[in-house]
Image: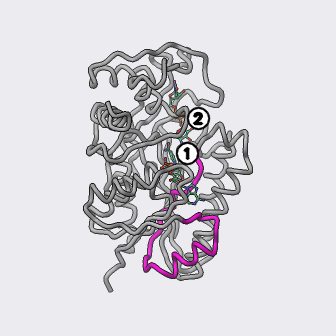
Amino acid sequence: MEAKKTVLISGGAGYIGSHTAVELIGAGYDVVVIDNLSNSEEASVEGVRRITGRDIPFEIVDTCDMAALRSVFAKYDFDTVIHFAAFKAVGESVAEPLKYYANNLVSFMNIVEMMKEFGRPNVLFSSSATVYGDAETLPVTELTPRKPATSPYGNTKQMAEDILRDCCAAYAGLYGIALRYFNPVGAHPSALIGELPRGVPNNLVPFVTQTAAGVRECLSIFGDDYDTPDGTCLRDYIDIVDLACAHVAAVRRMTEGKMEGKFEIFNVGTGHPVSVLELVTTFEKVNGLKLNYRMAPRRAGDVPAVWADTSRANEVLGWKAECSLEDTLRSAWEWEKRVRGL
Ligand code: NAD
Ligand code: WQD
C-alpha cells in the first residue's frame, strides 16, 4: 500500500514550520497547517502558497484545545504530524514558567492523544540543543548525557522527548522522531518567508539584521572572555532551508517504515562551531556593510560552546547541511530588508 503523503504541521505559520512546509511540498508531500498565530502571522502561510504555487489548507487552531484538534484529525487524512507549536523564549520561560509548561506540554500531549485516538502513527517533534546544557564533551552526539535543564523552556523539551519515548514504547502503532535543532538562522532565498520575532529579538541573527536595518541602535556581544579562540561563544548555526530538509528526510524515514526502533533522536546542525564575532564579521563582509556593535557582559544562562556531531543524521537520515554561513547570512539580510521595505 502506498504511504499517505499528507503531513499535519502544528505551528506551521512559524519560522521553522513555514520553511518545512515549502520543502515538504517540494518533495511531493501535501501539508495541512494549523497555528493559533500567537507568535506568527497568516502572511507566512501566504508566503508558502506563493513559493509553492499551492493552495495550502490552513486553520487557526490552538493545539491546547483538544476539541478543536479532534476536528482537525477528523477532517484531514494524514499519517504524520510535525509538532512545532510551542513558545520558545528562554528568558520569558524563567519569568513565566506556567505559561511554558501549559502551552508546550499540553499542546504536545494533546497531539499524541489524538494520534492514539485516530490511529495515526508518526510524530516528529521539535527538540533543541538546549537539552544538552553545558555539555562536558564537544561536539555533542545524541548519546551525550542531557544536563538538568536550566530553564523551564529547556525542561519542556526534555520532558516532551521523554513523553514521546514513553508513549512510543507503550502504544503499538506510535512512532516518534525528535530532531534536536542547533541554532536555526537565515531565510528562504525568495525572501517571502523568514523569521519574524515580536519585540526585541533574543536571538543573535535577528538582532544583527535589525541593527543593520537601523531598527536597533547597537548589537551587544554578550561576553568576550570565554575560553574560546576569540573569547566569544561558539554555536552551530544551521541554515533554515537545510533544517527544513532534515524534516523531509525524517518524515520520509517514518512514512517509508524505515525506522529501526519506535523512537529515534537526531542532532540537526552543521557540525561546525562559529563564534559570535565570526558571525558578525561574516555578516558584514557578505552584505558589504558595517554593523554597530560593542562588547558587553556575559548573558546569564549562556553556555560557552555547543555544536553538533551530525554523523547520525548524515548516515541514517542521509541528510547533510549544505548552505554556507555566507549564503545563510545573505538570506537573513535579504529577508530583513524586505520586511523593512529597504
Ligand atoms: P515560532 O514561534 O516561529 O513558531 C512556533 C509556532 O507555533 C508559531 O507560529 C506560534 O504561533 C505557534 N504556536 C505556539 N503555541 C501554539 C499553540 N498552543 N497552538 C497552535 N499554535 C501554537 O518558532 P520556531 O522558531 O519556528 O520554532 C518551532 C519549534 O522549534 C518550537 O517548538 C521551538 O521550541 C523549536 N525550536 C526552535 C529553535 C529556534 O531557535 N528557532 C531552536 C530549537 C527548537
Ligand atoms: C547565540 C549567541 C549569545 C544575542 C537559543 C536558545 C536555544 C535554541 C536556540 C530553542 C550566544 C550571543 C545573542 C545578542 C549576543 N532555541 N548573542 N548578542 O542562546 O545559543 O540558543 O536559541 O530551542 O534553546 O537558548 O541562541 O541566538 O540567543 O545566541 O552576543 O544580542 O549569540 O550570547 O552566544 P542560543 P542566541
Indicate the position of residue 28 as horizontal and vertical percent values. 27, 68
Q: Is residue 52 left or right of residue 85?
A: left
Classed neighbour count for the residue bearing mark 2: other residues with Cα under 10 Å, few (<14), some (14–19), many (≥20): few
Classed neighbour count for the residue bearing mark 1: other residues with Cα under 10 Å, few (<14), some (14–19), many (≥20): few
Indicate the position of residue 297 as horizontal and vertical percent values. 61, 16
Which SS class for mark 1? loop
Which residue is pictured at 59% across the width and 73% down the height? 68
Quarter the N terminus occupies: bottom left
Which SS class for mark 2? loop
User: What type is the residue that disc 1 sits on?
Assistant: Thr
Asked whether the beta carbons under mark 2 and mark 1 sit within 8 Å of each other, the answer is: yes
**Mark 2, residue position:** 136
| Disc ID at residue 208 | none
Which residue is pictured at 34% across the width and 74% down the height? 5
Q: Which of the two residues, 66 or 301, is positioned nearer the viewer here?
A: 66
Indicate the position of residue 30 as horizontal and vertical percent values. 34, 70
| Residue, far front | 341
Residues in magenta?
A: 61-88
**Upstream in the sequence, badge 2 or badge 1?**
2
Which residue is pictured at 45% across the width and 42% down the height? 196
Indicate the position of residue 82 as horizontal and vertical percent values. 47, 63
User: What type is the residue that disc 2 sits on?
Assistant: Glu
Judge whether 314 appears above or below 77 on screen: above
**Mark 1, residue position:** 144
